Amino acid sequence: MTETTLRRHLTQSALDPNLIFLLEDIASACRSIASLVRNGAFEGNLGSANVENIQGETQKTLDILANDEFERICSNSPRLAALISEEVEEVTWLKEPKAGDYLLYFDPLDGSSNLDVNLSVGSIFAVMQVQSDGDRNVLLEGRRQVCAGYALYGPSTMLVLTDGTQVTGFTCHNSTGDFRLTHPNMKVPAETSEFAVNTSRYRYWDTPVRRYVDECVAGETGVRKRAFNMRWTASMVAEIHRILTRGGVFLYPADSNNRKAGGKLRLMYEANPMAMIIEQAGGAASTGFTSILDIQPNGPHQRIPVILGSQSEVDRLTDYHNANHSSETKE
Ligand code: AHM
Ligand code: MG
């Protein structure tokens, strides 16, 4: 039986050939980053590069190298007009933008605090299109994403993609390096008893998030009447991949400690691509009040609160946010 490779899958789709070239370049960049990650200890690349990025975070050497790989490989795509990276303050324009050209938003190495402890990390990306000739506006809402995906550098390297019709997972064969279709039509299970949140931030949380987590922790004797499990890897890609596989809900809410910044996670290259993937897989994505994909961005590095996962849990969390908001406005 012929195994379906990424190329075969893409060329059998109705996608624009220039988008296929770009997606193949992204896959090549991810393959190269997987190798950099695996060999990081030999090359002395696991530690800090002692420079701060635009977010005020200390960059790891591999953050910079991963960004360079995306830039080096994807810049060859003929219709790619601009790169918007977590690691680069300004938008990198590659050509005079023409209507329909592509814009690539990416976090080259997400969860890089996991590198030193040899846990899973990933890359996240989204593709949008230039609206009209000469238009340099990259602040487009997530509904305009034509494609989104992530690479997971775990026990195996995987590429998970959505083109707005379905979510498809490919695994990189360790000997040949080709991505092969292994997870067709991925779906988030509708019901779940698992949640993912950094509970060390409990003291900063707002009432709706505390209420939700308290009810999960209460187990069989609480209002949820069943036991919940909790997982937190501090690597969003690993977290979302688990939720796509066996269900769950992921929260990185705004809290009293990060509210001034808008939250923790970045809208354009973390929340938006993951929201598109999760929605395409039958789940939901919200800030607690608004659908993530409907947010009009105010800057390329904007941060927002993120709730992603099984529809029923996201609905419950948005209900709790709305109930709290209306009781606060009544007071
Ligand atoms: P990064 O882009 O600097 O790696 O930050 C994003 C990561 C996410 O992968 C993860 O969900 C979160 O930060 C973990 O945050 P915390 O350290 O508060 O648990
Ligand atoms: Mg990140």
Image (cartoon, rainbow, N blue to C red):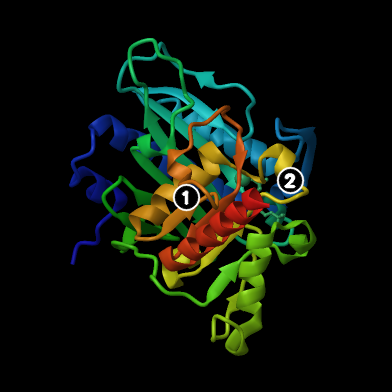
Please say if 76 is above or below 274: above
Query: Picture coordinates of residue 159 (x, y %)?
Result: 42, 53
Query: Picture coordinates of residue 143 (x, y %)?
Result: 37, 39
Q: Residue at x 61, y 89 (%)?
A: 221
Q: Horizontal placement of 196 versus 7: left or right?
A: right
49, 303: nearer the viewer? 303
Can see residue 27? yes
20, 41: nearer the viewer? 20
Q: Which residue has dot 1 on it?
A: 274
Can see residue 59? no
Q: Which residue has dot 2 on it?
A: 258
Label 2 Cα neighbours within 10 Å, binned few <14 / some 14-19 / many ≥20:
some
* SS at circle 2: loop
Please say if 149 is above or below 226: above
Q: Residue at x 54, y 74 (%)?
A: 194
- Mark positioned earlier in the residue sequence (2 or 1): 2
Please say if 276 is above or below 241: above
190, 10: nearer the viewer? 190
Q: Residue at x 71, y 43 (%)?
A: 259
The residue type indicated by label 1 comes to Met
The residue type indicated by label 2 comes to Asn
270, 310: nearer the viewer? 310
Q: In which quadrant of the rendered image does the N terminus lie?
A: bottom left
Q: Horizontal placement of 60 versus 213: left or right?
A: right
Q: Where on the picture, by quarter, is residue 51?
A: top right
Query: Picture coordinates of residue 264 (x, y %)?
Result: 67, 46
Specify the farthest residue to the front.
330
